[in-house]
Image: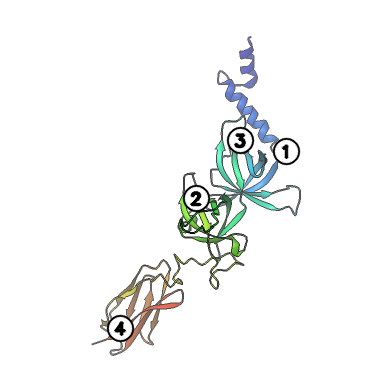
């Protein structure tokens, strides 16, 4: 019996691929001994569908950078680019700091496949309830010439922000969005451009922005969004209540609003006897009392923005 036949019998491939048999055995022992490493971490993965799963990883340094990592997974476990991986810096220390990394790309051209990841060094606060880890890195630093008559120095301090692309960030990440890093007035930036050249990632180029006293909440990190919120006096939204001014008793009439405001609006019906059915964008009104005046009001973020008086006639 020659050498190859001996290997086939030993590996139990029965005429199959010896290479596949070797890989199968290698994966078996790698999986069995996966936790027997100082690089092992029991982590959690925050996926693009906003679900969270437990996952075993090995965390290795990538070159000399303390923020760039190689993350190895068990055989057959293949997270996708954009997934957040959160783990302890020291697996054996109960009080160890928890750190979040974002997966940037697969590395197939090595003996053991892994994924390149980067430490999320900032948190992008979108509102009082939603925030996401992100990577913020300086793009450039220099002096611009902005006048050919008089030299004025302007710091060209741009930051690139990398964040997971999911159903929530799809709604928020856009040019004009303001953010605050480090709970400091010196850490306020505004998005100038957004690219998606990497799968499942938003990469936003941001530039320094000014603190808006009385509107920006530095403590919470929630920034005023004058390009999207109505609080900016330069932006006027149009509101209209569409429906009949006069109605017949005992009949139901439908009223709806028309607006270019991005906010969810609320209705208020002022009447002691009218029947009022609120369906969100549409409402239904009916009243039996001839001569009664029903006042229908529309509110945006607590501010009254439109009013319609409705008369019940014969």
Label 4, label 2: how far apart the Cα atoms are: 49 Å
State the residue position of label 3.
75
Residue 180 higher or lower than 18, as above or below: below
N-terminal of the two: label 3 or label 1?
1
| Residue identified by numbered label 1 | 37
Residue at 36% in and 86% down: 273
Give me the C-alpha separation between circle 3 and circle 4.
69 Å
Label disc, if present, on residue 202 of the rendered structure: 2
Q: Along the polypeptide, which appears first: circle 4 or circle 2?
A: 2
Mark 3 lies on a secondary structure that is: loop
Q: Are marks 3 and 2 in contact (CB under 8 Å)?
A: no
Question: Are circles 1 and 4 on residues that touch, CB within 8 Å?
Answer: no
Secondary structure of residue under mark 4: strand
Q: Is residue 272 left or right of residue 221?
A: left
Q: Is tag 3's residue or tag 2's residue first in the polypeptide sequence?
A: 3
Decide: few, some or many residues near mark 2? Use Cα within 10 Å; few <14, some 14-19, many ≥20. many
Would you name the residue on which mark 4 appears?
Answer: 310
Disc 3 packing (10 Å; few <14; some 14–19; many ≥20): some
Q: Nearer the viewer, residue 93 or 285?
A: 93
Q: Is residue 116 above or below residue 148?
A: above
Rounded to the nearest angstrom, the CA distance separating label 3 from label 2 is 28 Å
The x, y position of residue 277, in whole percent, is 37, 76
Dots 4 and 2: beta carbons under 8 Å? Answer: no
């Amino acid at each position: 019996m020659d050498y190859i036949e001996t290997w086939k019998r030993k590996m139990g491939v029965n005429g199959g691929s010896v290479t596949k048999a070797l890989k199968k055995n290698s994966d078996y022992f790698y999986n069995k001994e996966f936790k027997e490493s100082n690089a092992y971490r029991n982590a959690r993965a925050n996926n693009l569908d906003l679900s969270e799963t437990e996952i075993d990883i090995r965390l290795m340094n990538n070159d000399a950078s303390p923020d760039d990592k190689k993350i190895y997974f068990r055989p057959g476990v293949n997270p996708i680019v954009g997934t957040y991986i959160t783990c302890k810096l020291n697996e054996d220390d109960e009080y160890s700091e928890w750190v979040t990394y974002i997966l940037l790309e697969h590395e197939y051209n090595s003996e053991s496949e892994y994924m390149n990841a980067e430490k999320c060094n900032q948190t992008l606060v979108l509102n009082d309830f939603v925030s996401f880890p992100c990577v913020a890195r300086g793009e450039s630093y220099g002096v611009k010439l902005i006048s050919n008559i008089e030299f004025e120095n302007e710091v060209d301090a741009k930051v690139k922000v990398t964040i997971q692309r999911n159903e929530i960030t799809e709604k928020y990440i856009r040019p004009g969005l303001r953010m605050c890093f480090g709970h400091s007035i010196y850490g306020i930036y505004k998005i100038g451009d957004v690219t998606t050249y990497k799968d499942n990632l938003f990469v936003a180029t941001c530039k320094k922005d000014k603190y808006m006293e009385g509107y920006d909440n530095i403590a919470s990190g929630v920034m005023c969004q004058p390009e999207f919120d109505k609080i900016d006096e330069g932006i006027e939204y149009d509101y209209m209540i569409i429906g009949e001014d006069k109605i017949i008793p005992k009949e139901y009439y439908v009223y709806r609003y028309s607006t270019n405001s991005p906010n969810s609006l609320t209705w208020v019906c002022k009447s002691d006897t009218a029947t009022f059915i609120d369906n969100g964008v549409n409402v239904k009104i009916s009243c039996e009392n001839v001569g009664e005046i029903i006042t229908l009001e529309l509110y945006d973020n607590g501010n009254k923005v439109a009013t319609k008086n409705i008369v019940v006639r014969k």
